[in-house]
Image: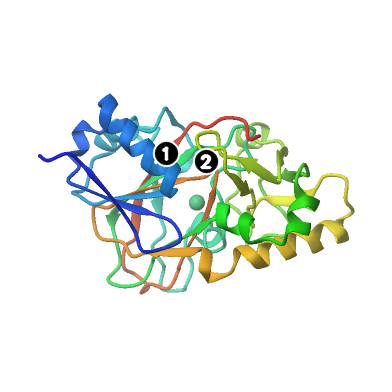
């Protein structure tokens, strides 16, 4: 097979990888190419065949060490580093709580002290229409803020929690063990990408509760102002799934959300791997 090629998307973020033999992904040269593409484009789409959980875990090693997800009930039995995300819409309009929460912009695991560097999502079953996953470039959101706002927020810190009154929907219940593992954490509001040195606004509409040192009203007003910029379509790209796609995104400089707009009863099942990250700075 020819060497893999990185084709940038005509969008605010993202690139497609052509001619990639997924089994070669963890070789040093290919892994370096994939990680460079991720840091530069923040979102990488790799089309191909469906993979077993084992094959997906092996492929994911190109990006780092796989991290087990918090909620035990989602872990794949045979390969616990791979989660099975079922977001099939039931006839009564209900679906898994995680899927409902994913309707709003978020970055994965920001309620952890060391949030996942990247997420891999792989389509196993997709509905006949709808169900796109949307991505937001948080470098361009930061760059688009007025200079006075950037000066105001540089150096601020924020509390991220498993749940916050600011989120539209409530999360899945945690077991007592899972609660003990997830105390609230503090992160910078503006983080620096460790590979490129670029600054990104570090928001999460489902987890970011408040700014440290501000009262609720002042904090809400500032977070609402920042959210308004992040909701502008000029920072967004929507990925329409083809069966077998693997999509990898950089949680350090993006948010994502899903359209829960697909027909009821049609299966939507993804395999997911989280890649271990560092402490945000
Ligand atoms: Fe997510």
**Disc 2 residue crowd, few under 14, some 14–19, many 20+, Cα 10 Å:** some
Where is mark 2, residue-wise? 71
Q: Please, is residue 251 above or below residue 104 in the view?
A: above
Residue at the spot 24% in from the left edge and 35% down from the top edge:
55
Is residue 17 visible to us here?
A: yes
Q: Residue furthest left?
A: 1
> Looking at this view, is 112 or 6 the one in front?
6
> Looking at this view, is 140 or 119 the one in front?
140
Residue 214 location (% of width, % of height): 88, 51
Image-based side of 146 in relation to 248, left or right: right
Q: Please, is residue 97 above or below residue 159 in the view?
A: below
State yes or no: Cβ of the residue under disc 2 lies below 8 Å from any atom of ligand 1.
no
Give the position of the N terminus as an image quadrant: top left
Q: Secondary structure at mark 2?
A: loop
Where is mark 1, residue-wise? 75
Residue 179 location (% of width, % of height): 66, 37
Image-based side of 139 in relation to 179, left or right: left
Residue 221 location (% of width, % of height): 81, 63
> Looking at this view, is 169 or 143 the one in front?
143
Q: Please, is residue 263 above or below residue 9 in the view?
A: below
Quadrant hosting residue 206: bottom right
What numbered label is drawn on residue 88? Answer: none
For the residues labelled 2 and 1, say whether their Cβ atoms are less than 8 Å apart.
Answer: yes
Residue at the spot 28% in from the left edge and 35% down from the top edge:
59
CA gap between label 2 and label 1 equals 7 Å
Could you tell me how many numbered marks the image carries? 2
Give the position of the C terminus as an image quadrant: top right
């Amino acid at each position: 097979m020819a060497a893999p090629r990185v084709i940038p998307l005509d969008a605010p973020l993202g690139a497609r990888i052509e001619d990639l033999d997924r089994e070669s992904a963890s070789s040093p040269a290919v892994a370096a190419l994939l990680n460079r593409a991720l840091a530069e484009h923040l979102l990488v789409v790799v089309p191909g065949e469906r993979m077993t959980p084992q094959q997906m875990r092996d492929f994911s090693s190109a990006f780092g060490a796989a991290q087990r997800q918090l909620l035990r009930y989602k872990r794949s039995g045979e390969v616990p580093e791979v989660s099975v995300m079922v977001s099939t819409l039931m006839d009564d309009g209900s679906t898994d709580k995680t899927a409902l929460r994913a309707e709003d912009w978020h970055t994965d695991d920001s309620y952890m002290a060391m949030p996942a560097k990247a997420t891999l999502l792989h389509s196993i079953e997709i509905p006949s229409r709808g169900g796109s996953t949307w991505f937001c470039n948080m470098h361009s959101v930061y760059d688009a803020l007025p200079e006075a706002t950037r000066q105001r927020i540089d150096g601020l810190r924020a509390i991220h929690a498993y749940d916050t009154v600011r989120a539209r929907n409530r999360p899945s219940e945690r077991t007592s063990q899972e609660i003990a593992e997830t105390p609230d954490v503090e992160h910078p509001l503006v983080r620096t990408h460790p590979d490129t040195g670029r600054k990104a606004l570090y928001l999460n509409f489902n987890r970011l509760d408040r700014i440290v040192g501000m009262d609720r009203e002042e904090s809400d007003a500032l977070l609402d102002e920042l959210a308004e910029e992040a909701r502008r379509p000029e920072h967004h790209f929507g990925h329409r799934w083809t069966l077998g796609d693997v999509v990898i995104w950089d949680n350090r400089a993006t948010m994502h959300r899903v359209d829960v707009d697909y027909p009821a009863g049609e299966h939507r099942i993804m395999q997911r791997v989280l890649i271990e990250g560092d402490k945000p700075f």
